[in-house]
Amino acid sequence: AQSVTQLGSHVSVSEGALVLLRCNYSSSVPPYLFWYVQYPNQGLQLLLKYTSAATLVKGINGFEAEFKKSETSFHLTKPSAHMSDAAEYFCVSSGYSTLTFGKGTMLLVSP
Amino acid sequence: DAGVIQSPRHEVTEMGQEVTLRCKPISGHDYLFWYRQTMMRGLELLIYFNNNVPIDDSGMPEDRFSAKMPNASFSTLKIQPSEPRDSAVYFCASTPEGGDTQYFGPGTRLTVL
């Protein structure tokens, strides 16, 4: 069975600082991995996805993630946080037709 | 494309009442998913359909919950009778055959008093 673990339910950064949201997956085969973002009172929006092509994946809004099989990780980064990045971020694993969601990490950005 | 459409966006009802949530998937998408999001349990898959046929309903909490997909462009999630613990945000998502990305609707926030 697949599982996804996000380290830290809340992450606080200052505007302009590096954003690092951690995700580790557990799967018997290399999965498809995604990061979704949920802004307040909205649905989930795809940030980026890894589907066994390039291990460094670039997404929208300046975010990127690197798939590291040796570490079973798929951490999300952004060099410089913006106030508009404040949201909840979900690391997601895909197996066949269904998704396995992490618990989510709330990113707080202070001026 | 209008994206996945859900209605209503907000629903407040009293315990014991029937609640019906609606979803229109993206045209041409063969898979439709219903999720529930709560603070305690996060995002949970309730049920999903492929070509209007329910494939896996193991996430449906109990018999009070039922879901239908009478055609490719419409699905409902019904709770009867509703209970306060059903209060949550319910999301619908869709994806095409062979697709690797699910597209989510804006959700329905349900409050059962």
Image (cartoon, grey):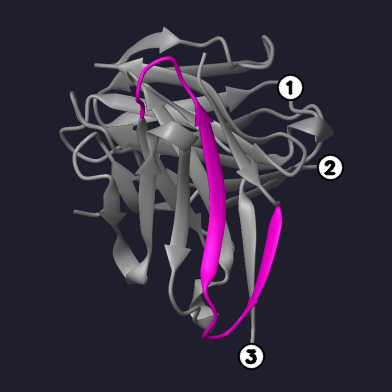
Q: Residues within 10 Å of mark 1 (few under 14, many from 20)?
A: some
Q: Sequence-wise, which precedes: disc 1 or disc 2?
A: 1
Q: Position of residue B86 (x, y in %)?
A: 74, 32
Q: Amino acid at mark 2?
A: Leu
The residue identified by callout 1 is B81
Q: CA distance from mark 3 to mark 1?
A: 47 Å
Can you tell which of label 2 and label 3 is closer to the viewer? 3
Q: Amino acid at mark 3?
A: Pro
Q: Identify the residue at image location x=33%, y=52%.
A: A48
Q: Residues within 10 Å of mark 2 (few under 14, many from 20)?
A: some
Q: Identify the residue at image location x=29%, y=25%.
A: B31
Foreground of the two, B26 or A46: A46
Q: Amino acid at mark 1?
A: Pro
**Circle 2 — which element?**
loop
Q: Position of residue A92 (x, y in %)?
A: 46, 38
The residue identified by callout 2 is B113
**Circle 1 — which element?**
loop
Q: Which mark is residue A111?
A: 3
Chain containing the residue with disc 3: A
